[in-house]
Image (cartoon, rainbow, N blue to C red):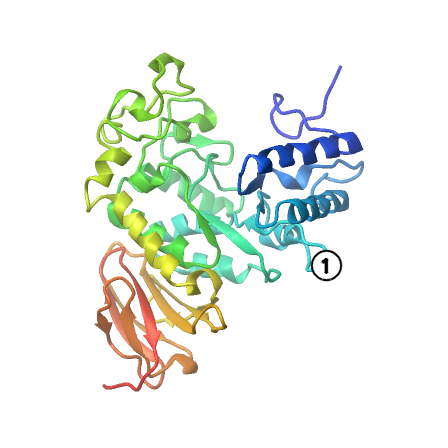
Amino acid sequence: QFFWHRFFSHQPDLNFENEAVQEAMFDIVRFWMDLGIDGFRLDAVPYLFEEEGTNCENLPRTHEFLARLRAMVDKEYPGRILLAEANQPPAEVVDYFGSEESPECQMCFHFPVMPRLYYSLREEKAQPIIDVLADTPAIPGGTQWGTFLRNHDELTLEMVTPEERAAMYGWYAPDPRMRANVGIRRRLAPLLDNSRPEIELIHALVLSLPGSPCLYYGDEIGMGDNIWLHDRDAVRTPMQWTPDRNAGFSSVDPGKLYLPVISSLVYHYNNVNVEAQMASSASLLHWVRGMLQVRGRHPVFGLGAFEVVEADNDAILAFTRVLTGDGDHPDEAVLCVNNLSSRPQAATVQLPEHLSGRQLIDLFGGQGFPWVAHDGRVTLTLGSRDFFWLQLRGGEDNG
């Protein structure tokens, strides 16, 4: 006896050719929607159907099924979402949004952005991020890319060049135990050597670039990993809520936990936990919450147009987010400037003509920055791994 499996042998593929299987999947979706979940992440969605003579990816019948699923969800559970997990180039993933006439998923993960953020941080150059965003196709209205820094799998390096992959293994996974499949099985904080400035900068990037950011549990408190665990389990250990037994995750005997809690010297749950960080205004958790609050107060980050602007320094990534107001949101323009270098840097940024002559105001503290000159130029100095989110307010250059 044999069975078909695209991935691991303990993951047999379902026979979606059978209409009874399709209806059973619809019923499973209804079951969880009835319990109140907000939506589903559709894992490995390009591989639902198989067809002789093809690689069984992105088949028309897969898209037909997703369109039916979306129609059912919209009709019976309005306001819920479907998020496609398709680890493929954006030019192929974009099809999983569907069309206005036949919509599929409201969101799709954008996989190539994530490794470029880490690569640019070590190379200290903005161009890899600029390039991957330039290769990102337009998407239908009412949809959005899902962006992320880490998830429950390895940090995939399938969509970088062999040279970039070798460099990233050297930077982020020098120990072979830190590697899995074609990627790196480490959490965010250990990847960045627990460097608070780097953790803050990479969060600032994912929160300001196009897309809806998805944060992986534990990264908001700087949780560690356990590379002695099997495969992807290294980054799937229990959430660390308190310094108590089992990190407050469960009251069962520690031996019955699905995985052991992190007890390494640097990332021990006695020190790295939600309770401790809630009690400290200087904690990473407080900082992440503050960033999310600022982002939430400015719809431009979720809805605004994105444009890279020229900077005369290779280590500086500068871009604007501009929202044309409507009845629900006012006009808003924000300049984001990021120093990818480990050293302080100065840069002159060239803004487009329609943003010249404006005042720059810090979104976090409200402090005034230099005005943008009438030729669109403004010079800024940033500290090591520093970033600015600067609102562009209308007015005449007083300088």
Three-letter residue code for mark 1: Glu
Mark yes or no: residue 43 visible: no
Q: Quadrant of residue 30?
A: top right
Look at the picture and state if 106 lies above or below 50: below
Give how far across and how far down residue 96 sits, in percent.
65, 50
Looking at the image, residue 301 lies above or below residue 69: below
Residue placed most toward the observer, 82 or 32:
32
In the rendering, at what x and y percent does residue 210 appear? 47, 59
Q: 274 or 2: nearer the eye?
A: 274
- The crowd level at tag 1 (other Cα within 10 Å; few <14, some 14-19, many 20+) is few
The answer to whether one can see residue 297 in this image is yes
From the top left corner, tell me how far across and down residue 264 is, in percent: 26, 25
Badge 1 is on which residue? 101
Location of residue 96 with respect to 246 vertically, above or below: below
Tell me if residue 259 comes above or below residue 62 in the rendering.
above
Q: Nearer the viewer, residue 134 or 272?
A: 272
Image quarter of the C terminus = bottom left
Question: Which part of the image, by quadrant, shows the N terminus?
Answer: top right
Residue at image coords 72%, 59%: 101
Is residue 153 left or right of 296 when viewed as pictured?
right
Percent across and percent down for residue 211 are 48, 56
Q: Residue at x 24, y 73 (%)?
A: 369
Location of residue 398 by image quarter:
bottom left
